Structures are given as C-alpha cells and as structure tokens.
Image: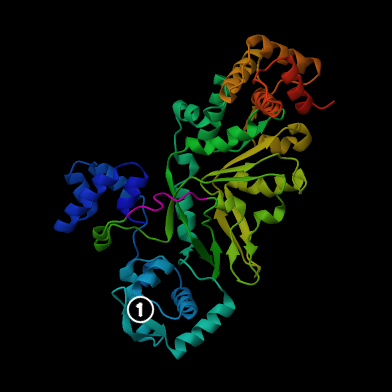
Amino acid sequence: MRLSDLLVALELLSRHDVNDALERQSRSGRPLGDVLVEMGLLSARQVSELQDGLPASPENLAQLGIDSRIVFDILVKFLSTVGHGTTATIAETLAIPRRLASLLMEQARAQSIVELKPGIVAGDLRVELTPRGKSMAVEALANSAYIGPLPVSLSAYSDRIRKQTIRSETILPQQVAAALTPLAIKEDLLAKVGISANSGRSILLYGAAGNGKTSIAERMVRMFGAMVLVPHCFEVGGQIVKVFDPSVHKRLGAGADRGTSASLFADEFDPRWVPCRRPFVSAGGELSLDMLDLKFEETARFYEAPLHVKAMNGVLLIDDFGRQLVRPEALLNRWVVPMDRRVDFLKLHTGQSFQIPFDQLLVFSTNLSPQDLMDPAFLRRLPYKIHVHGPTDEEFTRILLAAAADRGVACSERAATWTIDAIRKHGTALAFYQATEIPQQVAELCSFVRRAPVADEETIAFALGNLLVD
C-alpha cells in the first residue's frame, strides 16, 4: 500500500485531491509529501508525523532485517510452484518494492538460482529456476511450505507493538458515546467504560444476562481511531509465524485505485506491513488453553499466531467467562504474567521460547458471580470491575416503545406498564433484551395469524410465554 492510498483510507484527503497531487508529482518528480504541503492539502507537521510513523521501504536485502536464506527460500518455492515469474509477480508475492525485487533477481542470477527466459510478460522479463534453483526449492519446501509475503523480524514486530500501543490514544467522552450508539447507556456507565478503555488495563464486565455486556465490549474497539500496522508474518528462530488474518484485521484502503503515476515514485512504505484499524478478537465458550499457544501446521510446517497475538494493539474479549472448555482458574493463571508484566512467552515446537509484548485491552465478560470465578489475587489484577445493570422501568418503557415503532407494532405506555408488571410477577428481573425481543415476537405472531400488529395483553403474554421459563 502506498502513502497516497493511505491518506484516502485515513480520510485525511479525498481521492480527487490525492490524484491531483499525484499528477503534480509526476510532472515535478518531487516527493509526494512535499507536493501535498505545497498545495496546502496537509501541513508539514502532518506529513512528518505520518511518514515518521511508517516503516521505511527496504532498498536492499540487509534492510529487510531477516536472514537472506529465508528470502531466497521463499523466492525459489514461489517460482517452483508457478513455473516462472516476473519482477512484478515476485514483488507482489513477497510483498517487497519492485526495485528490491529487481535487485533480488540480479543476486539470484549471480548465484545461478534463476535464469532469464525468452518472452516478455506484461512488459516484464520472464525468469525461471535453474537446476540449482530447483534443488534449493525441493529442500526449502521440505522445511516449510510457506509461500507469501516475507516476514519481518521479531524485534521489528516487538518494536512496532510498543510504538502503537493501545495506551497511546486518548479517548474523549464523545468518542465513547458515538461508539456505544444506539445502546441505552447511563452517564455513569459510559464514564466507567471510557475511563477503563483509556487506561489500556484489564476490564471485567459482569451482571445479569441480556443487559448488553457483550454489546458494550464489541463496540469498545470503535472508540479507538488510530491506524496500526500488522505484519503478514514474523520470523523467529528460522520459523515463520503468520499474524495478519483478514477475518480479524480490517485492512485500510482495500481496493484503493492506484493511479499509474503513483507507481513511478517512492511514496510507499514497507509492504510487509498491512495498515489496519485496531483489531477486535472475541472468544467464548469454545476457548481452550491451546488456542493461546502457537499453532504449528504439521503439513505446511509454519505457525499461525494465537488469538491474543492477532488481537495485539486492539481489544480481546473473553466472552461468557466461566463457561469455557478450560477451567476458569487455569485460564486466569495463563494471563497472570502477561497482565502483570505486559509481556508473554511463546514456545516453538523445537522447544525454543521467545518473548513478545502483551498489548491489548483485555476484557472479561460474565453473567456469573466474579467471586465464584476468581480469587482475590486475580480480582486485584482487574482494576476496572464494571457492573452492567438491568434497565429501570423508564428505560425499559422507552426501549420497548422504540423497538415496537421500528417493527411497526402499535404499543401504548399502558401496554408497556402491563409488560413490566407481568415480568416482575413471574419473578424475573427486567433486562434490556426483553424490551427489544417482545415487539419482534408480537410482530411475528400477528403476521402468522394475519391480524393487525398490536401489542396488547394477549400478544405480549404470548411473547413472554416464549421468553420466560416456568
């Protein structure tokens, strides 16, 4: 991804303005940042802050920060799989600039790994493996079947995690309110959520089921606006660990239209890093301890990063805590060191262990009693324990009437009062989910029996009969 596309993705500039700047850049040959300042589109400080925060585009193999053998291994595996390649396809597959791909081809030719073949593909010379290159590919594939973007080093990844820590953002009250819309959140709860998110420390959301704990946690990541860079993968001990996951990481500027002039100038940063919004990862009852370890693919012989690494610099929600496959004590013990020291230790299948920063907003959500789940020592490590209460009569009525209106169901305040009384007579506490579920079931009943959608005692009693357990 190029700086020009990133400016549009971050909504700093419109695509029209960026294209104008690129046209002027193509005529002058000056850096894009200088052109943007000259045009008055960005200040020099904005350009400097943005460029200083991006990893520089590598211009030679040494600047990749990894062993050159890893580079050549992935190159020969790629060419062995596709049969032949070009500078463009190699650059795209290995996630390196084209000028570095050209340099890599020159070095590979000098070592008799590749050779030029007759024919031009899309204006680019075609290259194929030599017998020596094919022999290298067989050996490389036996060690690992990974083919894709080159890894960054563990030290570069660790430095990047610390640089873009979730604690570096300051969240304002209006950002919290916007993120939690349209949930019905009281001012005191909104403040607690905002302050805890600002702290970057661990959070416990607890309270009766159906009052929005999960909804609050899922929206917390929306409070953060900063971009983070996620590597496709990193290398440690000669092993590759995949990090970028399209199901978790929302790439900025996906599908951006790159003008032809943009490809002529070095306005790009290191393509091995993917610009994303802060990630959100959720794990519920399916969570087991092995999901917090590196996952080694026996056949492919490379690693998939665990959940909390994919959530790095973002929000990690442990939902329905206490209902996991693993015992609560065992899960909590797994988090003690990372929560205290902000570092975690992972182990390769070779037995080698390594350290990595632990940087995410860790949120536990449960409808069970915290005292039954955690001992005092662990409760102390959760500085923000937020009780999510059920609605008051007024809040319940307001939400019920609004939900009914959205469903096209006629509902009076008298019907709402009758509903509240019926729930209480049943011995059940009011919950936010009831106020939205009842109008939906009333609408479905009236549609089925072909009558006007009206919330009266008969239709509300039908809905309550489904919601409440005798």
The quadrant in which the N terminus is found is: bottom left
Residue 214: image quadrant is: top right
**Disc 1 residue crowd, few under 14, some 14–19, many 20+, Cα 10 Å:** many
The residue at the point 34 percent across, 85 percent down is 116
Left or right side of 60 for 351: right
Left or right side of 327 for 117: left
Residue 65 seen by the camera? no
Instruction: Find the residue positioned furthest to the bottom.
Output: 131
Above or below for 351 versus 330 = below
Residue 334 seen by the camera? yes
Q: How is the image coloured?
A: rainbow
The quadrant in which the C terminus is found is: top right
The residue at the point 63 percent across, 10 percent down is 413
Q: Which residue is mark 1?
A: 105
Percent of width and height locating residue 464: 75, 23
The residue at the point 49 percent across, 45 percent down is 278
The secondary structure that most of the magenta stretch takes on is loop
Above or below for 218 versus 359 = above
Kind of residue indicated by mark 1? Met
Q: Nearer the viewer, residue 28 or 83?
A: 83
Instruction: Find the residue positioned furthest to the right.
Output: 470
Percent of width and height locating residue 44: 23, 44
Give the number of marks: 1
Does the segment drawn in magenta span residue 386?
no
Element assignment for label 1: helix
Q: Nearer the viewer, residue 380 or 316?
A: 316
Instruction: Find the residue positioned furthest to the top.
Output: 414
Instruction: Find the residue positioned furthest to the left.
Output: 28
Residue 395: image quadrant is: top right
Percent of width and height locating residue 274: 43, 55
Percent of width and height locating residue 365: 67, 36
Q: Which region is colored magenta?
A: 249-257
